[in-house]
Image: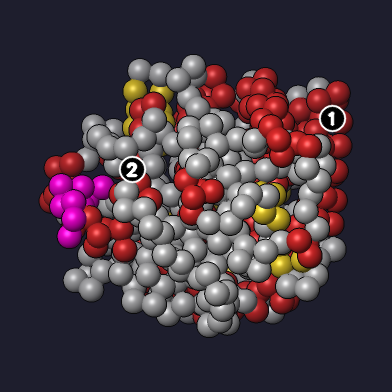
Amino acid sequence: MSTADQQSAHPHYREVLDAVPEFRCGDELLTRVFRHRWESFAHHALRGPSGWVVTEFRQPGPGRAHGSVNAAAGHHILEGRWLRRTDVVDDYLRFWYTAGEAEPHRYTEWIAWAAREHARLHRGWAGVADLLPGMVDNFAAWEGDSLHPSGLYWAHDLADAMEFSISGDGFRPSVNSYQFGNADAIAEIARRAGDEATASRFAGIRDRLRRLVIDELYDPRRQFFTTIPMSPDGEEAYLATVGAERRMPPEYRDLPVPARSEVSPDRDARELIGFIPWGFGLPGGEVDPAAAVAQLTDPDGFAGPFGLRTAERRHKRYGFTVASTSPRFLCRWNGPTWPFATSQALTALARIARDHAGYDAVFVELLRQYAACHIQPDGGYWLDEDLDPDTGTWRVRDWRRRHDPAKAEIGRDYNHSTFADLILSGLLGLDVDDTGILANPLPAAAELGWLEARGLVLAGVEVTVSWSPEVGMRLTVAGAEAHRPDLGPLRVVV
């Protein structure tokens, strides 16, 4: 950490940093960025009178209560669950579901799903069960103002934290996948808590929504999950609905879901959010991901020299011009690379690679590219809101340096994505179930030469995993060890 970082660190910074796990491998870039992202996370984990919260921007800075923003909360929870101490995420979840000043319904979110993932990793089911009333209430809020009579959820792209997307508002794969994931999590948490009525109700919601997303939002022609828009085209239509609520207009309830043939070519696009259903396991084995994954390496699709594009390059409105000069609208999801979207796509790709052979090498390649975007030409670190995928420059930062230098540092260490979770869960396949602790690394992890993760506490016990061609793979859990001579899955019963 630089001297400037040490001077700006908050009083509890060291407490958080002392609780982070270690990861090293034969790829120096991944090793460096893993450590840096934990240093960055420690800047964002703040402890106040009512416990820990995690911020989007470094504080003092933008945000709602205590610097919180619910749009990235799912990312924060998935990342923070790997800390050796559980109280940071435990408090943060309690904030979202019990604090009067919290706004869990401001942007679309997958907080309940992330809470379940945290609980599974630490077998902390009793803690999340206490939050069930808040989860159910928040889910009901989405049903009240965003659920269409068809059973699909509508979202404005700004309320989806994805402003100025090509598809715009409508029935988006993102919000519908989040609600699928939240329903799935609530059903499991309720079942474990002995609340069979709630478990059954939300399992039904989950299953109906899954069917609708596959039937309505998967486009067989494009072989991708895409948005079905509802509003007229154009920036004026967007700007007319950027108020604080940004919820489904009442008149939309009387309109049917538009047919695919009715979608304007100007709004019909593959966007990176089409991977989100796979991130939540929604398609199961029903949808072949081959054509979708191919778009990640296609220069006319999402592939860029410096990052994944948020929209396919071939679309005629890729990178469309926005007339508004308000700094509020600097960020656009019509092509630029966003860490938020990149980490979602890589989470999905890791899941795809475990269910379908042959995609693991693409995951490792894109993980390295994502890591590289953290490193500046001078060797320092920077992570901001939107990156030019063709030049590698951070567009909002550069604009602010030219036009608003007083706020040029506002996007530093932008906490709107995951990285450690992509290593520990995505690459190494570390997980906990009711019988043991698992490591299931992707085969392409062998490209790193060797690897080691230590300083982990899962299900309350110390865990280390390592692999090298000479020694093989080892999973050590509270002194017990599983070993194999090659890289592959291991389990220790706990």
Q: Is residue 90 left or right of residue 142?
A: left
Q: Quadrant of residue 298?
A: bottom right
Label 2 Cα neighbours within 10 Å, binned few <14 / some 14-19 / many ≥20: many
Q: Is 203 contained in the magenta span?
A: no
Q: In terms of depth relative to the viewer, which is nearer, 285 or 141?
A: 141
Q: Is residue 267 above or below residue 173?
A: below
Residue at image position (30%, 58%) is: 396
Q: Which mark is residue 201?
A: 1
What's under tag 1, amino acid-wise? Arg
Q: Is residue 190 left or right of residue 478?
A: right
Q: Quadrant of the C terminus?
A: top right
Above/below status of 135 relative to 254: above
**What residue is drawn where x is 33% and y is 43%?**
57
Front-lying residue, 55 or 428: 55
Asked whether residue 446 is in view, the answer is: no
Region rendered in magenta: 402-410
Residue 151 % position (x, y): 80, 40
Where residue 334 sits: x, y (%)?
49, 63
Which residue shows up at 28% across the image and 52% down it? 412
Q: Residue at x 44, y 71 (%)?
A: 307
Residue 57: numbered disc: 2
The amino acid type found where label 2 is placed reads: Phe
